[in-house]
Amino acid sequence: IGLKYERQGSEKESSAIIETGVPKYITKRWKSVGIKAGKTKKKHNAIVIGRKDQKEELKALKKIFNKVDLLEAKQNQLSTGYDILIDIEGLGEKGSKVDLNRIEQLKRLVEGKAIKVMLQLTRGIESLQRKTVKESGIERVGLYRMLGHEYGHVTTRHIDIDQTGDLERVISIELEASDSPEVCWRKGKRYEA
């Protein structure tokens, strides 16, 4: 993201922003972190935001959780009994737009206080060890971050995996991992922002 602004004065004095004409860039710093090996016991029930054509991803999730149900975009009646929400639409080549109905669904799920963890998975939107990035799922990263701040009982995490990412292994580890809101998996290694 190219920014053409710079802070003027000390932090104590002023927070005025002036245009300088000199591009500034925001970059993330990633650090490699150890992986705690472990297998999640089938004690969680997950509701999944995804598409019916994501059969391989859904199959991997069914190996991890007691119950896995796909939440359709236009579905008004929400089932109960879920403690984890996983958004896998960003793993596809093309994501879907965030519409008001989807935001309302997420809000109702979170306000019910049953959902404790929200994981959003994408494939290749972070630039770590990549020359190009994809856009599928990028529009939801901020939405989940905001929900995590707005509702204190929910932990949110954005997880970007590469093409070789083993979904079952990644999710099992992430459910037991730290509270870092941004994680990247590259060639089997885990990085936190």
Image (cartoon, grey):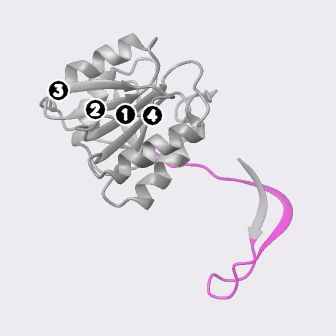
Of the residues under marks 4 and 3, which one precedes in the sequence? 3
Of the residues under marks 2 and 1, which one precedes in the sequence? 2
Which image quarter: residue 72? top left
Disc assigned to residue 86: 1
Q: Which residue is mark 3?
A: 66
Disc 2 and disc 1 in contact, CB within 8 angstroms: yes
Residue 12 in sight here: yes
Q: Amino acid at mark 3?
A: Asn
Task: Indicate which label's residue lies in the foreground, 4 or 3.
Answer: 4
The residue stretch that appears in magenta: 7-31
Q: Which residue is mark 4?
A: 76
What is the secondary structure assignment of the residue under circle 2?
A: strand
Residue 31's x, y, as percent? Answer: 41, 46
Q: Is residue 17 magenta?
A: yes
Disc assigned to residue 46: 2
Which image quarter: residue 77? top left
What is the secondary structure assignment of the residue under circle 4?
A: loop
Position of residue 147 relative to residue 190, above or below, is: below
